Amino acid sequence: MASHYREPPVTVYQPFLEGTEPLQDARGEWLSIHPRTTCEVVEIPSKGSGLVARHNLARGTRILVESPLLLLPDGAASRCLDELKCTLQELFNAMSPENRQSFLSLSCGCRVPCMMDLAGIFKINKLSCGSGSGLFPSASRINHSCLPNAEAVWNEEKGWLTVHAITDIPEGTEITRAYVEGSFQERSVFLHSEYDFVCDCWICSCPQVEIAASDSRRRTIRGLEEELRLPFKTCCELLTDLVTLVRHLGEEFGWPGAVPGGRLSVSFNTVHQAAACIGDHARASIFARLMYDIQYIVAGGDHPRSRKLLDLFYEAGERLV
């Protein structure tokens, strides 16, 4: 089937999918959503600058779409410090004055800031961009939370990064993403070693007994995700595991689809494939649609994977006829 975008049919998710999309100019070229329409940069106590919602943002709202100030392949980003500094200096020198100012306005992660610490700025503010890393004027300012309300996704085809709300975000609330996952201890060690800060998000500020309960839920979630990837399970067994997984995700993240990385979509795919293999096309169609819904919320309808999943949904539906 041809892979082209079609409007999705209306489902119960539709109220959450009416987010903002990139605008087009008269030449048909995509324009970035100006961050001031959805969010603004403010000083966050003990964090430095961050982004907060300027108005209520429904789940699925596109908060940002940005092209990178610079983009480095993984090989270049992992070079020794001196080589990295030279590469960054060359790219910095080639920037427009406006982009240079945006670059230098980002935090360098130093206790005593240095305006020209390009490597420090890059390390602290880079985001994953497929097989590389990039710096972004606004998206790089999004702070960490172990219970994030937004997801940043790189679109290789378009050459831009999008940020979508994965939960409802009330006006004035800080927009956050997850820098790392794992247990409380694992997250704390990583954040201190890589970013030199101690997370004070809601879950990390809870009493020890609640932190332990969260760690237990996250271990259970990981275990169930691994169980769902095991071969030779029946569709009924997979569905039982999936129901349990969704319940634990809801308890930990508030909404199952809010787990970082859109991982729930991977679990839905396992059940979709199992149902398709036994000829249960009705169930395969349902889970193809659920995969698309999650992907649409975290990455928007213009992402290549979103279009691929929408095609999969229509193909599954055609088998019901």
Image: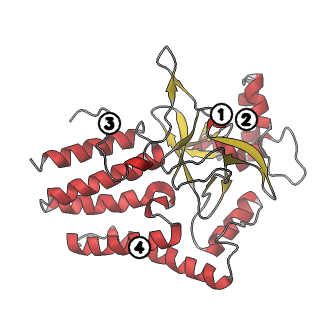
> Relative to 232, is 224 on the left or the right?
right
Query: Are the residues at dot 3 and dot 4 in contact (C-beta closer than 8 Å)?
Result: no
Question: What's the amino acid at mark 4?
Answer: Arg
Which of labels 2 and 3 is toward the front? 3
Would you say residue 234 is visible in this rendering? no
Mark sitting earlier along the chain (4/1)? 1
Query: Which residue corresponds to mark 3?
Result: 7
Mark sitting earlier along the chain (2/3)? 3
How far is disc 3 from disc 4 in space, using C-alphas?
Answer: 30 Å
Question: What's the amino acid at mark 3?
Answer: Glu
Label 4: which secondary element? helix
Label 1: which secondary element? strand
The extreme right residue here reads: 112
Q: Image point 42% across, 36% down: which residue?
A: 302
Kindly indicate the quadrant of the structure image that contains residue 83. top right
Question: What's the amino acid at mark 2?
Answer: Leu
How far is disc 1 from disc 3 in space, using C-alphas?
Answer: 33 Å
Mark sitting earlier along the chain (3/4)? 3
Query: Are the residues at dot 2 and dot 3 in contact (C-beta closer than 8 Å)?
Result: no
Which of these two is toward me, 51 or 53?
53
* Residue 238 x %, y %: 27, 71
Q: Which mark is residue 37?
A: none
* Residue 206 x %, y %: 67, 77
Query: Which residue corresponds to mark 1?
Result: 70
Mark sitting earlier along the chain (2/1)? 1
